[in-house]
Every structure is written in C-alpha cells, then in structure tokens.
Image (cartoon, rainbow, N blue to C red):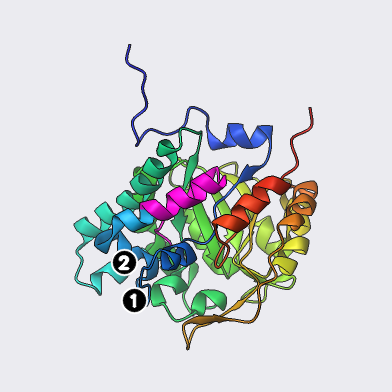
C-alpha cells in the first residue's frame, strides 16, 4: 500500500496527543518575517493580502520558522475575513479559497521539513478586520450574538480546511471570547483561546481569572493563555491560566514593543527574553512561542531553552 504523505496531509499524531508528551514550540510573528522578506504590509488586509498577491512569500515565511525549530505553524488568516476581502473586490467564493489556502501553505511548509509539524488556523478578533488597532481595546459595542454572527462563516471555512487546531487569538474581551466559544462548539475541531492582556486584565479590563474561566469544562479547548502582550505580562498570566482552568497553557507574547495604530508602526524597545520559557513551562505552559516582532532567530533561541519532558 502507498503510504507516502502528500504536502497537504496532517501529521500522524493529533496535537493533543503530542501536548500530552511535552511542550511544543510555536512560530513567531508572521508579519515581521514577511517584511524581512521585502513584503509591503501597509494595506488594511495586512498579511492576508499576500494570500492572493504573493502566496509563495507566506510559504517562505512559514518555512523560515519551521527551519528555526517551530513545531506548530500559525496560518496567515488572522486578518482574513469575508468583509475585509469584499472591500478589496474579492467575492465570498474566492475569499473562502484564500482562507483554505492559508492552511495549505502552512501544511506544505511543514511537510517540506520532513519533521512532524502541526498547523494552527488563526482566527483573529473582530478588531483585526477593522484595522484600526481596536483589537487592543475590545468593547466594540457589539453583542455576543452579533460577534458570533461575524465569526461563524470564517471559522466554519477555516475548520473545513483541515487544520490541526483553530487558534482563537489576540482576543481582547470576554464578550468576544464568549462569541467565539459559542461558534466553535458547533464544530468538531480542537481550539486554543488566547487573550491579549495588559497587566492582570484583558485589554478590555476584565480580570484574567474570569476570562480564562470561560473554558472550564469545554473539552474542545485544548489550551488557554495569552499572546501579543508584553513578555512581563505573560509571566503572571501563565500562572493564572493554569490555576483557573487546569488546562495546558499557550503563551506567545510579542517583542515588548507597542503598536501605534495611528502611525502604523511599533514603538519602544524589545524585552523578549527566550530564557523566560523555562518559568512558563514550570507554571504549566505547553505551547510556547512568539508573536509580533519575534523572528526566526528568537524562535531558535526558545528551542534551545526548552526543558525536556521528565522521563
């Protein structure tokens, strides 16, 4: 019987089974790697524009992280929405193809390494579609029902593309988390939920223990945690997430710089320190990596810091 895997085939083990055996390394920021490759991301679609204009650049960025040691690749669908594509004259059928293509690009990049890699389909928050920085504020003035109505079509599309997990990421608000959890529970696909936080609260100001507690008892959620936050804020959040849920924790902060939505640029200085990962692991982190401004060299450094699982 022919058993060779094609580039679109998932790995032999589920992500959940792999997590049970130890910590897995995520990739870093896709946008900064694309910019390092010479791509222009000034468009409101951000990296999602390259799904139609330059898909080879996206696959190359994934490949850079896979070569750095990443075991989980996050797709370029963070800012990919039917509404956002429509504003650029892209119809629903083509938009769905592009979202599915984001999963295929990551799968091909992973398969090319010859190692076992998993693909997480990124589901960004409502504010990412607005492209005005509101994903770092939350409280959009929409109800849970309205937010669920927005997210449902893209979540269904990404789930149908066959990722290993959906990454519900950079969520700033409990209300949006409730909407996303409502939608994904209609599907049979594992997810992780990660908030963007400031200090000990969500970006919208809600206590983290309350925010993380939403996933208690939802078996479909394989991990909960934080991303695209200051590395110092991630330290405490890992402990709170583990205590509030008993689930594995996912943590991938940004470089420590701050996003200026008006100037569309990062300001401040980087504070990302790969050595932090050992404390995260000891506190319960099982999916670790980086977000914006964390590049392949940082991911390679994280790989060198990871503690091996106990025998």
Q: Position of residue 268 (x, y in %)?
A: 64, 82
- Quadrant location of the C terminus in the rendered image: top right
Image quarter of residue 83: bottom left
Residue 201 visible to an observer of this rendering: yes
Q: Is residue 63 inside the magenta stretch?
A: yes
The question of residue 1 being in magenta is answered with: no
Foreground: 168 or 143? 168
| Residue at left offset 44%, top offset 41% | 110
| Direction from residue 151 to residue 302 in the image, left or right | right
* Residue appearing at x 48%, y 27% in the figure: 12
Q: Quadrant of residue 248?
A: top right
| Magenta-tinted stretch | 59-78
Give the quadrant of the N terminus.
top left
Up/down of 63 relative to 54, above or below: above
Residue farthest to the top, as pictured: 1
Residue bearing the label numbered 1:
43
Q: Is residue 8 above or below residue 263?
A: above
Q: CA distance from mark 1 to mark 2?
A: 7 Å
Label 2 environment density (alpha carbons within 10 Å; few <14, some 14–19, many ≥20):
many
Task: Classify mark 1: residues with Cα within 10 Å, few (<14), some (14-19) or many (20+).
Answer: few
- Under circle 1, the secondary element is loop
Q: Position of residue 214 (x, y in %)?
A: 64, 56
Q: Which residue is mark 2?
A: 49
Residue 21 is situated, as x and y percent measured from the top left of the image, at 67, 32
User: Who's the residue at 35% across and 35% down the image?
Assistant: 7
Mark 1 or 2, nearer chain start: 1
The reply to whether residue 285 is visible in this rendering is no
Residue contact between numbered discs 1 and 2, judged by CB atoms under 8 Å: yes
Q: Secondary structure at mark 2?
A: helix
Query: Is 274 positioned to the left or the right of 171 in the image?
Result: right
At horizontal 47% and vertical 62% (from top left) the residue drawn is 33
């Amino acid at each position: 019987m022919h058993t060779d895997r094609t580039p679109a085939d998932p790995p032999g083990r589920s992500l959940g089974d792999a997590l049970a055996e130890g910590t897995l390394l995520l990739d870093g920021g896709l946008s900064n790697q694309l910019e390092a490759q010479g791509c222009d991301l000034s468009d409101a679609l951000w990296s999602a524009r390259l799904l139609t204009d330059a898909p080879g650049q996206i696959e190359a960025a994934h490949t850079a992280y896979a070569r750095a040691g990443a075991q989980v690749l996050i797709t370029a669908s963070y800012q990919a929405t039917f509404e956002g594509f429509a504003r650029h004259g892209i119809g629903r059928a083509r938009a769905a193809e592009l979202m599915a293509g984001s999963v295929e690009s990551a799968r091909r990049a992973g398969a090319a390494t010859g190692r076992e890699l998993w693909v997480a389909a990124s589901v960004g928050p409502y504010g990412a579609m607005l492209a005005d920085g509101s994903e770092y504020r939350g409280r959009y003035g929409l109800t849970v029902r309205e937010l669920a109505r927005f997210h449902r079509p893209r979540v269904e599309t990404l789930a149908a593309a066959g990722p290993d997990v959906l990454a519900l990421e950079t969520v700033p608000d409990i209300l949006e988390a409730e909407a996303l959890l409502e939608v994904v529970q209609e599907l049979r696909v594992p997810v992780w939920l990660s908030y963007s936080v400031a200090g000990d609260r969500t970006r919208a100001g809600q206590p983290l223990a309350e925010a993380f507690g939403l996933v208690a008892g939802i078996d479909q959620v394989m991990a909960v945690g934080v991303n695209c936050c200051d590395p110092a804020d991630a330290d405490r959040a890992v402990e709170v997430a583990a205590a509030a849920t008993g689930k594995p924790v996912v943590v991938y902060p940004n470089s420590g710089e701050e996003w200026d939505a008006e100037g569309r640029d990062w300001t401040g200085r980087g504070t990302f320190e790969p050595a932090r990962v050992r404390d995260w692991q000891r506190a319960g982190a099982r999916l670790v990596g980086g977000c914006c401004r964390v590049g392949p060299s940082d991911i390679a450094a994280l790989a060198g810091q990871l503690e091996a699982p106990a025998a």
